[in-house]
Image: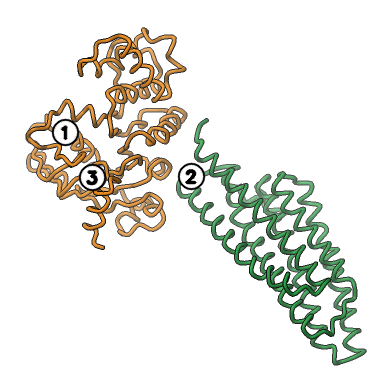
Chain colours: A orange, B green
Amino acid sequence: MTMEAIRTEAVRAGDVRLYTEDLHLHYGDVHALKGINMEIRGHHVTALIGPSGCGKSTCLKTLNRMNDVVPRVRITGSVVLDGEDVYGKAVDVTVLRRKVGMVFQAPNPFPMSVYDNIAYGPRVHGIRRRIVLDEIVERSLVGAALWDEVKDRLKKPALSLSGGQQQRLCIARALATGPEVLLMDEPTSALDPISTLKIEELMAQLKRDYSIVIVTHNMQQAARISDYTAFFLLGELVECDRTDRMFASPRDRRTEDYITGRFG
Amino acid sequence: MARSHYEHELEHLHVEIIKMGSLIEGAIEDSTRAFASHDLALCARIIRRDQTIDEMEKAIESRCLWLIAREQPVASDLRKITTALKMVTDMERIGDNAADIAELTMRIAEKNVFSDSGHILQMAGAAMLMVRDAVSSYVHTDLVLARDTQRRDDEVDAYFNLIKRELVHVFKADESHLDNAIDLLLIAKYLERIADHAVNICEWVEFSVTGTHKSAQIF
């Protein structure tokens, strides 16, 4: 079976939640993504790794169109979610970002209460009833393993939480809109080791309900937490495979050199 | 719990080692019984079961390598995983030796000229106990038991020398017993090797706790 046929089969079987097809991205003259074909499987963690400037964060951001607002950006190819190209004309970007949530490198709670941070997204999507919002806030905080720590101070400013708690709050905020896919851009790089482990544990739980794509500079983290790993270099997707295969016997020499720390 | 997947994997590794330990104990026990009673059917079962032991070795090695690659263990965790990785080689060899004894027993039984000095069974009992205690010292992280077990290797070696002398005597008395004497000597040699592997296991248990292997601080 050809790679193309395997892929078509996987998409048809519903294993693949999201995929890119011949995705190119230019920032002005810079060709930042060069024909990326990548699948994101449901209920798995996919880690995007590679040296700085390799295109992994750019690729992550194309998955929910976060690059749209970047000046002089040009994107060709497609990103397909649930059978629909997210770059299609009919796509409502707000709805897309509800389905594909994002967590950033540094925790970025809004300067409002814990409760309002979580309720923000659902309110934007028209949910007003207090009882519904209460339920969403609790469910999201439970989902992000933060409920027990903040349930008695929901009205306190989110910025009064610790860094690790703030990042879990941001994850809870992403969960509040009921996404299918969670994108995480180096979500632990600003956190201490204990908070990092909490987020990693949380991801292992979250993948039961969501598909997760994480960009990480930390190869050990990719090895620990992901099911699939994609290695990017100079805007190319060099290799994407099951993490156990990638860290045992990668097919491409460049991947081997990178994961063994010989360059990058 | 932090790193619950990792903890789970370590626990699983521990359980796998215990399972493999009980398989090899069973293999020696059975090979001794088969030797004593000329039980050919039991010999055949021991030889077949050795494949399971080989498969367990591979599975444990694979688990250890994945743990190292994916979890980057350090300190006592790394010692435990290294210990498992080293121990299974000795455990697998013990399984092989038990199967070797079963094969020789089949040959001896078929020739029907079997003669045992009685000391082989005693030697087998001592070697089997060493293996049991070596595995037990791993299971309970029992340094005292590990060290005591290592010391008992001298008893097994003494049995080997005794049996060798007895067999030389048997051969001198009747040269037609040569084949039989060699088979019995091989069985004694396998038992002596089994005890050596038990000592190796104990040395790795000691390393796991102290970082010291054969008096050298290596990690």
Which of B34/B218 is in front?
Answer: B34
Counting from the top left corner in percent of width and height, residue A88 is at: 9, 37
Residue B195 visible: no
User: What amino acid is at disc 2?
Assistant: Gln
User: Which comes before the other along the chain, label 1 or label 3?
Assistant: 3
Report the residue at 66% width, 70% height from top: B47
Which of A202/A132 is in front?
Answer: A132
Note whether A20 is above or below B215 in the view shown: above
Instruction: Mark 2 and mark 1 in contact? Answer it, CB < 8 Å.
Output: no
Pointer 3 residue:
A54
Which-is-in-front pick, marks 2 and 1?
1
Q: Chain of mark 2?
A: B
Counting from the top left corner in percent of width and height, residue B194 is at: 74, 65
Dividing the picture into quadrants, the one containing residue A256 is: bottom left
- The residue tagged with tag 2: helix, strand or loop? loop
Residue B72 circle label: 2
Note whether B214 is above or below A108 in the view shown: below
User: What amino acid is at disc 1?
Assistant: Arg
- The residue tagged with tag 3: helix, strand or loop? loop
- The residue tagged with tag 1: helix, strand or loop? loop
Residue A24 circle label: none
Note whether B119 is above or below A55 in the view shown: below
Report the residue at 74% width, 75% height from top: B40
Crowd around label 2: few <14 · some 14–19 · many ≥20 (10 Å) = some
Counting from the top left corner in percent of width and height, residue A1 is at: 26, 63
Crowd around label 3: few <14 · some 14–19 · many ≥20 (10 Å) = many
Pointer 1 residue:
A65
Q: CA distance from mark 2 to mark 1?
A: 35 Å
Crowd around label 1: few <14 · some 14–19 · many ≥20 (10 Å) = some
Report the residue at 13% width, 46% height from top: A24
